Amino acid sequence: MEQGVWDAPGQGSETATLADVLAFLEASVESLCQVDWSDLDADVLVDAVGRAEIAARRLEAAGARATAELAGLHRQKGRSAGGVAALLAEKLGLARGVVHGRIEAGGRQATPAGRAAAVGEITAEHERIISRAVSGLPGTMGGSATTRFAEELTEFARAVAPARLRTEAARRIAALCPDRGKDREEHQERRRSARLGAVRTDGTSTLTMTLTPRARALVERALGDFGGPGGAVACEPGSDERTPEQRAHDALVHQWALGSTVDPARPKGIATIVVRVTPEQLEEPAALVETDSGTQLSVRQAVSMAGSLPWFVSLLRDGREELHRIDVDAHLGRRLASAIQRLVLYAAHGGCSFPGCTAPARRSQFHHVKEWSRGGPTTVGNGTLGCPVHHAFVGDGPSAWTTVADPGSPGRCTWLPPGVDRLTDV
């Protein structure tokens, strides 16, 4: 039986059997389960939750390694991989797929992601996502390049949720394997579906969809515009008691209702999607580009989204506009910017213009460089983008920031900190 060195409470270092280690673990878990959490303050609870999470991750990794070792012993006796999984699944009361996953994870603990999972830096789900991404790399990649890819994804995984990691892994694989984009659209079109379920006895029904990137971008835009508290319904601030799922439902219904009555001059009601495409990418219809929310789609799909509304597209080549110019400032007497004005700023600025801020365009607001209250017109030239946090920096108080047009960069502005009132003082 495997031996280990451990320090039990109140004892010196001694050699313990695996049975002793497990008994101590079980006793520690039993003690933890008896803790009265209601008597502890927030700081202590935050620390406890973090430590318990790391311990749970390490325990899961240790269990996966033990499961892999046990499976190896059974295979030495002539049992197949499927037979081993079936045997362990029955013994442990688990699904075969879960057991298969543990066996495979236990055999990957020498990889960068496996080592990180073994010490609790990432979850088992993070490790599985990275493993699938590495297995999807082309065989022509060398071992050092593959290892570097795995190390970079593992480092990225330390600070993000599994869903974000999955998206980033797909983006990096697409960048490394551009040829795969040739069949990507056909695959997406084959998988697209929407099924409206039968009406239930209570009058509700279900809608199940598999979305193409274009459809997902539209849904994300609708949720961003109308899916927040108070979105799509009239209510007092702070009184929206709908669940996130109910808000998402209402946002989509609201967007569908607006679909046949879009007015380009209205400040709301248009599901704007920002996609930046270079002239070189336009010559490759299968090339992958991203919306400002990170959804990947092909150039062909991005161009098709413009439909019959040419003001959705602004193409610059060598610094010159090649498409027909529209009167984006036709309503400069209004305080609220129009959808077209916001689109122009989205394309020009990409997101919040406050120095160092990375908030994307879809999370930014139109800001008057020269404030509306001081005679600033609602024009693209007097507009910039500011996320809700930095937009709130601007005001009249002693601690407020101000914005001024930058003569050296037409179409841009400079944010002046409190106490600075001239561009030359920055």
Image: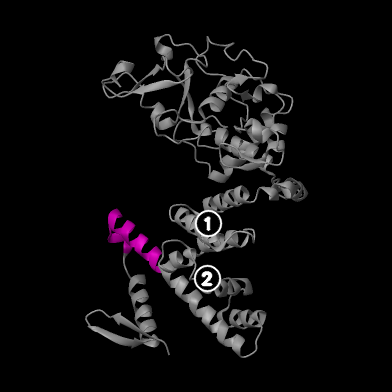
**Colour scheme of the rendered structure:** one colour
- Quick one: 220 or 66, which is closer to the camera? 66
Residue 48 colored magenta?
yes
Above or below residue 29? Residue 358 is above
Q: Of tags 1 and 2, which is closer to the observer?
A: 1
| Main SS category, magenta section | helix
Q: Quadrant of the C terminus?
A: top left
Which residue corresponds to mark 1?
Answer: 149
- Quick one: 204 or 140, which is closer to the camera? 140
Residue 65 point in image, percent of width and height = 49, 76
Q: Residues within 10 Å of mark 1 (few under 14, many from 20)?
A: some
In the image, which residues are magenta? 37-55
Q: Quadrant of the N terminus?
A: bottom left
Residue 15 point in image, percent of width and height = 31, 87
**Circle 1: residue type:** Phe
**Circle 2: residue type:** Arg
N-terminal label among 1 and 2: 2
Above or below residue 160? Residue 57 is below
Name the side, left or right, on which 179 lies relative to 16. right
Which residue corresponds to mark 2?
Answer: 108
Residue 158 in sight: yes
Above or below residue 268? Residue 211 is below
Name the side, left or right, on which 298 lies relative to 344. right
Secondary element at image label 1: helix
Residue 417 point in image, percent of width and height = 30, 24
Residue 113 point in image, percent of width and height = 48, 63
